[in-house]
Amino acid sequence: MYLPPILLQSGTEATKNPLEILLSMRRMKQGFSLSKIGGRLLVSLISVFLTVLLLEVGLRLFVPVSDMPVVLFDPEVGVHLAPEQSGVKAIGAAGQIKGWYHINAEGWNSLHEYSEQKDPGTLRIAVIGDSYVEALQVDVDKAFPALLEHLLQSDPACTNYNRVEVYSFGYSGAPLSQYLSMMRYVSSHYNPDVFVINMIINDFDESLEAYTVHRHFLRFRPGNQGGFEEIRPEPYTPSPLRRFLLNSALVRYIYYNLDAPSILASISSGPGKQPVIGDIPPADQALIPDLTALIFGKYRRISEANDAGLLLVMDADRQAIYSGQPPRLGHARYAEIASQTAARLGIASVDLTSAFTDDYRQQWRDV
């Protein structure tokens, strides 16, 4: 049996200091408990480290973990992809959806290296949009701008041209207002013969400052004297910590493959709830037609200044189509605003809802 040193002293000394004996024993007990806790904590930390290390190695060896291109800020156009990157964007726990991307020297996902010079006899089309145009989820040669270029090269209507080029300018999350910034950039550098603006449901209200998802995009707010004020994109400084963390396959797997932001958003919004497109206060809804007319008018002036054609494309409500439902109210309302505004301004436009619906019914519904 172990006895504290103080109890091994002479009986006279020990009996003279009973309080000291008790305090000594208590200190010894506390020291033993702290040592035990520290040991367990150290074992736990080592276990966590080894688990993370095994997951990191296992993901790199056996699972298609998503890469993600680095972004930067260009004062002329706002935030966009940094040049000269390649990788694979993967979605799903097993990387079921994979797309190879190639960011060219100008910072856009394309097989082309863009040239400011245009050879005689060249038809150059600039496609501007958000993630549907950026198209990181499919191989870059399968993105619709690349497919469009391939189709037009063999189209009889283009036989008078020596060359057909389709340059794509897409950035995830960009709204109508940011397309204007991108269109100005394209106009000043690449002299296209045709501008194609691909629009989706949420492009309209997110052009208002109150609903923007990215302060590094061009946006608008109601002016004090009526009309709207244009707000330039705010400078963006990449986070060194974020870039460091993205070197980890485990971090990228959780964030991109498993789409952690969407999972967290679903949890915070409650079970079964989906965001309602266009669900903004009536006072702000009333601003959308005038804002759309303002932006469309600016599109038209840029195309006219370049002696170029302009086509506005309203993408389909794919979520509704794939679930067998009619277009959501927000899509129908904004598609009508876009169509009516384009017609009033004499701009060619097309709504892809019917085309996507028919294609899905014929080819994909039973897959």
Image (tube, rainbow, N blue to C red):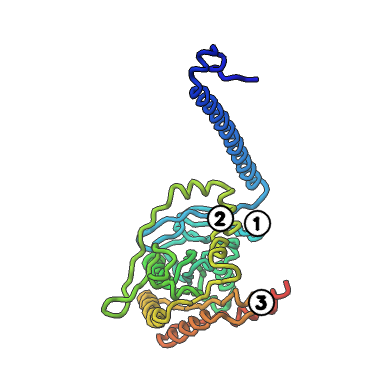
Which numbered disc, 2 or 1, marks the residue that appears first in the sequence? 1
Q: Amino acid at mark 1?
A: Ala
132 with respect to 118 (left or right): right
Q: Position of residue 258 (x, y in %)?
A: 60, 57
Q: Seen from this angle, which residue lies furthest right?
A: 366
Please tell me the numbered disc located at residue 120: none
How far is disc 3 from disc 2 in space, using C-alphas? 30 Å
Which residue appears at 64% of the width and 47% of the height? Answer: 59
Q: Which residue is mark 1?
A: 93
Q: Seen from this angle, which residue lies furthest left?
A: 225
Q: Position of residue 58 (x, y in %)?
A: 66, 45
Which numbered disc, 3 or 2, marks the residue that appears first in the sequence? 2
Tell me where residue 49 sits by quadrant: top right
**In the rendered image, the vertical position of residue 202 relative to residue 62, given as above or below:** below
Q: Which residue is mark 3?
A: 360
Q: Amino acid at mark 2?
A: Tyr
Q: Position of residue 70 (x, y in %)?
A: 48, 53
Tell me where residue 363 sits by quadrant: bottom right
Q: Nearer the viewer, residue 119 or 305?
A: 305
